[in-house]
């Protein structure tokens, strides 16, 4: 996979970066395309909402 281009979304600078960007602690990814990296925040929100609806992962349904 090293020969495949990879892209990250930098949450510090709100932009797509290549391999030599900010530290990974400030990035989401890698993504296989620049377009997918550009949607990183939207994708994270979509996944979070799906997990919130998933009864296996929904902590609100747990009893004390």
Image (tube, rainbow, N blue to C red):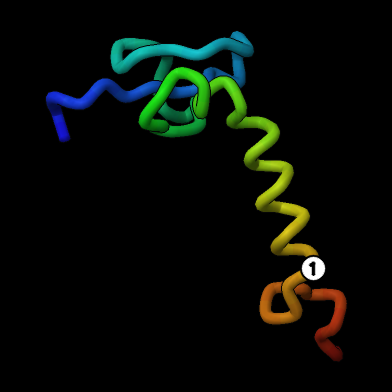
Residue at x 13%, y 24% (from the top left corner): 3
Task: Locate residue 11, reporting x and y percent.
Answer: 60, 21
Q: Is residue 42 left or right of residue 33?
A: right
Task: Locate residue 57, reporting x and y percent.
Answer: 69, 73
Q: Residues within 10 Å of mark 1 (few under 14, many from 20)?
A: few
Q: Is residue 30 left or right of residue 61?
A: left
Residue at x 32%, y 24% (from the top left corner): 6
Q: Is residue 35 left or right of residue 64?
A: left
Is residue 1 placed above or below 51 in the rendered structure? above
Residue at x 47%, y 29% (from the top left corner): 25
Q: Quadrant of residue 59?
A: bottom right
Task: Locate residue 52, reporting x and y percent.
Answer: 78, 63
Q: Tell me, yes or no, if residue 26 can be seen here.
A: no
The residue wearing badge 1 is 53
Q: Is residue 13 left or right of residue 48?
A: left
Residue at x 77%, y 54% (from the top left corner): 49
Q: State which quarter of the image contains the N terminus.
A: top left
Number of numbered discs overlaid on the protein picture: 1
Q: Tell me, yes or no, if residue 11 can be seen here.
A: yes
Residue nearer the viewer, 57 or 63:
57
Task: Locate residue 51, reporting x and y percent.
Answer: 70, 63
Q: State which quarter of the image contains the C terminus.
A: bottom right
């Amino acid at each position: 996979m090293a020969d495949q281009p990879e892209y990250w979304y930098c949450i510090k600078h709100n932009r797509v970066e290549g391999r030599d960007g900010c530290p990974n602690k400030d990035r989401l990814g890698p993504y296989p395309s620049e377009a997918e990296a550009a949607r990183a925040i939207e994708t994270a929100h979509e996944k979070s909402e799906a997990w919130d609806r998933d009864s296996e992962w929904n902590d609100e349904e747990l009893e004390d």
